[in-house]
Amino acid sequence: MVCYLRLLRGPDLTRATRTRMRTFLWVLFGSALFWMLIGQGGGLLNLFAAQSTLRTIGGLTVPASWLQSATPLFILVLAPLFAARWRRYGSRFGTASKFAAGLLLAGASFLVMAVAAHLAADGTLVSPLWLLTVYLLHACGELIVSAVGISAAVAVAPPSYAGQMIGVWWLFSALGVGLSSQLVNLVPVIGAPSYFLALGVAVAAYGVLLLIRRRSLAASLS
């Protein structure tokens, strides 16, 4: 946040540019929320895979860590499809609308996890399809958020500030991952189903808020 505020004080920035950069803070906070969920893939979700997922196939037990490869695999498979769709339909939707879609996908993934955690609460091993669905939603969300966010970070600032804005973008992403490492301490307190439900609803609600404000945000970012 300090780096972001320092950028706003740049002496060569025009009033219109400062307005765009202030409005971009909505996207930066959305980035932090998105990575707050995605950042839990290697920790909490992996523990769920190890402790609560049925991973035996033909007498062989699939290592829980193998499920972590699902997200990058989905990204590799889906990236060409998303790229083609963006070229054809991307101009019809603004930055806020696209970003909201990514947040809604991330929020939906934790709502799916809330159901899976509820089914596994009594010690029952659930199907790995629950986690694979979550990782698919993560991959789709990441293909949207990363592409749209970095592109918008470059567009809102003058060329001489582009590198710094991308740096701020990644700092907010890192903030989200850092928050996830602290929030996970709530699981023993409120239980996994409630934890996943609360975070899923919070992130999805922010996505809905971006959709509601998409016209005003688009006017300020343009």
Image (tube, rainbow, N blue to C red):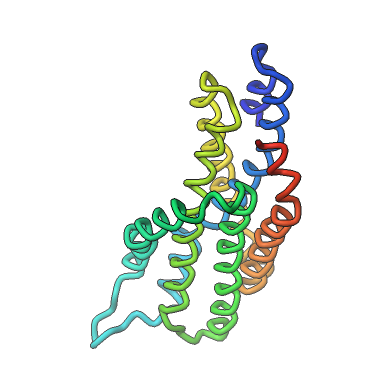
Q: Is residue 171 above or below residue 205?
A: above
Position in image of residue 152 (x %, y %): 56, 38
Q: Nearer the viewer, residue 145 or 199?
A: 145
* Quarter occupied by residue 68: bottom left
| Residue name at image x 64 percent, y 65 percent | 200
| Residue name at image x 56 percent, y 84 percent | 119
In the figure, is residue 18 to the left or right of 69? Answer: right
Q: Nearer the viewer, residue 190 or 175?
A: 175
| Residue name at image x 67 percent, y 57 percent | 207
Q: Nearer the viewer, residue 150 or 30?
A: 150
Position in image of residue 118 (x %, y %): 59, 81
Viewport quadrant of the N terminus: top right
In the figure, is residue 189 to the left or right of 56? Answer: right
Q: Nearer the viewer, residue 26 or 190?
A: 26
Viewport quadrant of the C terminus: top right
Position in image of residue 35 (x %, y %): 54, 51
* Quarter occupied by residue 139: bottom left
Position in image of residue 29 (x %, y %): 65, 44
* Quarter occupied by residue 117: bottom right
Q: Residue furthest top?
A: 11
Q: Is residue 123 above or below residue 108?
A: below
In this rendering, the count of numbered labels is 0
Q: Is residue 53 above or below residue 174?
A: below
